[in-house]
Structure formats: structure tokens, C-alpha cells
Image: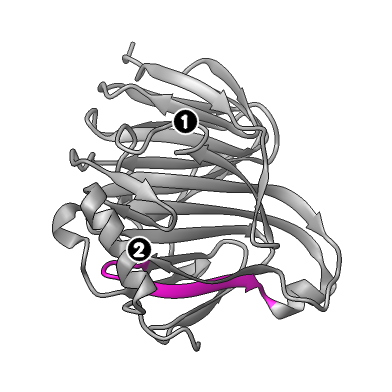
Amino acid sequence: MSKLRPIEEKFTINKEHWVGNGFRVRNYFPGGRNLLERFSPFALMDYNAPRKFPPSESSRGIGRHPHRGIETVTFAFQGAVEHHDNAGNHGIIYPGDVQWMTAGEGIMHKEYHEKEFLNKGGTFHMIQLWVNLPKKHKYVPARYQELSGNKMGKAGLTEGKGNVTVVSGEFQGVRGPAMTYSPMNIYLMDLEVGAKVTFNEPGDYNTGILLTGGEAEVNSLSCTHKDFILFENKQGEIVIESKTRGTTLIVLSGEPLNEPAVAGGPFVMNTREELDKAFEDFRLGKFGTEEF
């Protein structure tokens, strides 16, 4: 019998807060758990569980704001999000799409409900992830990747029991399209009742799973929607068995940066001095135009 990868902890975040007026989120880390260095390169995860928004003619979202030292990655499950930044990038993501913005040395952006979705209303279901950049890449030029669902790597399960969407890295020989500055595997899984998925991640990778719908057993531990499972950094199989129709989840697995990390507001840097400099540069207008 194969050895299962040990689970360090399972936790759920119930407290919600607004980001702007369009995102009602549960902050799993670093607010829910201080995992800034423990779970690197993943620095923050905000989960907007399914929420019904009524039709509106007034914009919903978050206005222009800066970032430095990270990448912001938004996953759309229901609803639609529009993005603008002051490097000239613009995109809209729909269910199945991902937008991956590298802030690097600094950028200003804004995100909001896409106009047609805003006017009609509907269910909104999203994740925003912050990926910390390695020290040697903290100040790379800004970059934007619009990753549509039809560009993703797809791995079907036997007997049509579901599928795995590969956003970055590789799953059982299928590669994802995202370009990253450190090695990481990000998968989305959509499972039918009775589906069973077995896979391995490198034992030294920081690895976790968030259930975004349904119920499953993860290495024999019963888990349900909104549970986050953090694995120990030991080699072993991960076995997911779906217990309900429409079980969905995201797998995050990345090589640790093994560097100090300091977070403050929209910035993640390696030292307090670098963090202070980011705030100073923003005050001095060094993040570029605010007219976009």
C-alpha cells in the first residue's frame, strides 16, 4: 500500500469582509492563518464563495490601487471580472478563465464586475491569490497573462468521472499555460460522485487544497466546501474521493522560496526597509499614472 502524504491541518474561515464593494471574501491566509513564509510562494488567498448579486447600474469592484513584489491571480468560477492597469492591459475573465498579473517593480490596477454581468446580476464565485516573487525577481517589469479556459491543460478522469484543469505546472503529463517565476503546480478539479484522483507532489513543495464546492475525502479525512487542507512537507500520495456531485477544488503546490517575507497593504517584500520604500514610492507617484 502506498504511503499517504500527512495532513498538517484542516481549517475553515467563516468571517467575511468586503474588498471594495464587489468582492465579499474570506481571507484564508495570511489573515486566517499566518502562512506567509510557511506556504510560500503563495502569499494571500481571498475566497469569494458563491454570492448572489442583484442587478445594478452602479459599478461594483475595487478602484485603482498599487502592487509591488507579487503576482495577483484571479480565478473565475461564476460571474465575470474586468481588469484595467496602467501598463495598458485590459481583460475580462468568465467562468473557467484566469488572469495573472505580475506587479513586479510596481503597477496600478483596478478590478470590477463586468458590465453585462453587473446589469443582469447573478451568482459571483471567485478566488484571488497572491503569488510572492523571489527576491531576484521582485523588480521585474509588470506583465499580464489572460488565460482563457480553452488554453488550459485538460486531463480527463477515467469513466468520465470528472476532469482536472492545469493552470500552471504539470499534472500527469499535462502542462498548464501560466508562466511563473518559481516552480509551482496549480490545478482545478471538477469531480462527479465516486470520482477518485490519486497524485503526487514533490515532498518539499508547500501544498494545500481548498474545496470550492461539494464534499470529499482527502487522504481519508472528511472535508466539505470552504475547508482548506494544508499538507506536511513530506513525500506521499494525495488521494481525493468525491462524495457528492459537483465537488470542486483547487490544488496549490509550490517550491518554497525560503526567503524572508514582509507584507503590508498591497505590497510583499523581503525586508521592512523595502516595504517602507514601496509605500514611499507610491506616495511620490512612482507607480505611474493614475489615469487609466
Residue 283 x/y as whole percent: 38, 72
In the figure, 108 relative to 259: above or below? below
The residue tagged 2 is: 279
* Predominant secondary structure, magenta span: strand
Depth check: give the residue in front, 106 or 114. Answer: 106
> Residue 98: percent from the left, percent from the top?
49, 63
- Residue 81 quadrant: bottom right
Mark 1 sits on what residue? 33
Q: Is residue 245 visible?
A: yes
Mark 1 belongs to which amino acid?
A: Arg
User: Is 249 on the left-hand or right-hand side of 266?
Assistant: right
Residue placed most toward the observer, 77 or 191: 77
Nearest-to-viewer mark from 2 and 1: 2
Outermost residue toward the left in this view? 136
Q: Which of marks 2 and 1 is nearer the N terminus?
A: 1
Residue 284: percent from the left, percent from the top?
34, 76
Taking the magenta stretch, the answer to whether it contains residue 52 is no
Secondary structure category for the residue under label 1: loop
Image location (x, y in percent) of residue 122: 80, 62
**Could you tell me if residue 93 is visible in this image?**
no
Q: Which amino acid does label 2 sit on?
A: Phe
Residue sitting at x 23%, y 56%: 274
Q: Residue at x 41, y 18 (%)?
A: 7
Q: Is residue 258 shown left or right of residue 178?
A: left
Is 106 included in the stretch rendered in magenta? yes
Q: How is the image coloured?
A: one colour
Residue bounds of the magenta highlight: 102-114
Residue 275 is left or right of residue 112, and the answer is: left
Vertical arrangement, residue 135 with respect to residue 226, above or below: below
